[in-house]
Image (cartoon, rainbow, N blue to C red):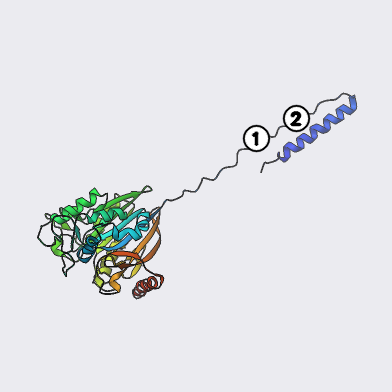
Amino acid sequence: MRRGPPARCTLLLTLTLALAAACSSASGTHIAPTTIVPPELPPSPTAPAPTVEPATTLLFTGDLIPARCTLQTIRDLGGDFTRPFQPLHDLLSSADITVGTLDATASDAGTPFGCIETFSLAAPAAAVDGFKYAGYDVIANAANHIKDCGVSPCGGRAMFETNENLRVAGIKPVGTGNDLYEARAPAVIEHNGVYFAFLAYDDIADYYHATADSAGAAPLDPETVAEDVANARKVANVVIVVPHWGIEYTATPSARQREFARAAAAAGADMVVGNHPHWVQAHERIGSTFVAYALGNFVFDQSWSVETQQGALLAVTFTGTRLTSTRYIPIHIYDRYQPRLAEPTEAQQIVDRIETASVALAP
């Protein structure tokens, strides 16, 4: 709204007009009144526009194991490794950063088994085509099958080739390396000017762990995670830990899982998102750190129980560097290879199992 002249100026103007009128009346001569121009007021200060912090969406999936009967099914359907991800492609690729856990190898260093009972979970290099199609940006492969070769032994080649295949596809592997130093190093992704660092560890197969002079997976260690988080914080604004841990086929995290989660939280990690148990597990907050203990299977052949055919995506939003929302998206694995959104009744059952286990963690 435009302002009027100050009161002092108005009075001066009135006096001038009165004097002019008196002189004109006395002498009969018209004297033009003096025009008073009010002084310019300083412009109203403009409040600075509020800084809008960028929002970044992340999507985490459960265990990726395109081996064994999953591999055989894909081959029987023509060998297209994008097939497992086709129903959820738009959801997976819509996140700004999509993160998975690879509990297998993806290389041609060995010869994968087909649909037989085996604990050697090797997949061919072509499996990475599916990960790329799905839109993965980071894959944690510090896991208990990272050196599996299948039918014939291949030493550490399967792990090295898996990492190289992921990098060629534009996906950052994390949690394995030529030595312990490299395995403990973070993978860093920048989005909207915010840098996200990911650290990954294995607590299952010590025979695959890296040492100071040998290649392998970073071992999960509550004593050293603080150093790793501090180093990651030097190059990133947000630090997320992705451990491979826990007891299979349980919804309740073990004492070991909770011990490490507390150590990661005390070190300043923003999130901890684990896998390996093949079931969904509880979540909790430790201080400001959100912990999701396990997301279940995502691509795997364990059709022998309801729980192993179920899982959840974890969708989160960071506003700037602050975690501002978390949401579980339940899934069901069909035909031993393809995850799809769970039907409403089943989805509620999956969420209820997560929440029941979570409530049980409360002191």
Q: Taking 288 as reference, is 25 left or right?
A: right
Q: Residue at x 32, y 60 (%)?
A: 60
Whether residues under marks 1 and 2 lie with C-beta atoms below 8 angstroms apart, the answer is: no
Camera-nearest residue between 282 and 78: 78
Provide residue 309's location: percent of width, then percent of height.
29, 70
Q: Is residue 173 above or below residue 357?
A: above
Q: Earlier in the sequence, mark 1 or mark 2?
A: 2
- Which image quadrant for residue 65? bottom left
Identified at 34% across, 52% down, the residue is 237
Image: 95 above or below 38? below
Relative to 319, 19 lies left or right: right
Tell me the residue that label 1 is attached to: 40
Circle 1: residue type: Glu
Q: Is residue 130 above or below residue 19?
A: below
Q: Horizontal and vertical percent for residue 71? A: 22, 62
- Which corner quadrant of the image does residue 239 belong to? bottom left
Residue 90 is situated, as x and y percent measured from the top left of the image, at 37, 56
Residue 108 lies, in percent from the top left, at 15, 55
Q: Is residue 221 visible?
A: no
- Secondary element under disc 1, as helix, strand or loop, is loop
Q: Separation of disc 1 and disc 2 at Cα? A: 15 Å
The label shown at residue 35 is 2
Visible residue check, residue 345: yes
SS at badge 2: loop
Q: Quick one: quadrant of the C terminus? A: bottom left
- Closer-to-camera residue (223/16): 223
Q: Residues within 10 Å of mark 2 (few under 14, many from 20)?
A: few
Give whichever of 198, 60 is nearer the camera. 60
Quarter placement of the N terminus: top right
| Amino acid at the residue labelled 2 | Thr
Q: Which mark is residue 192?
A: none
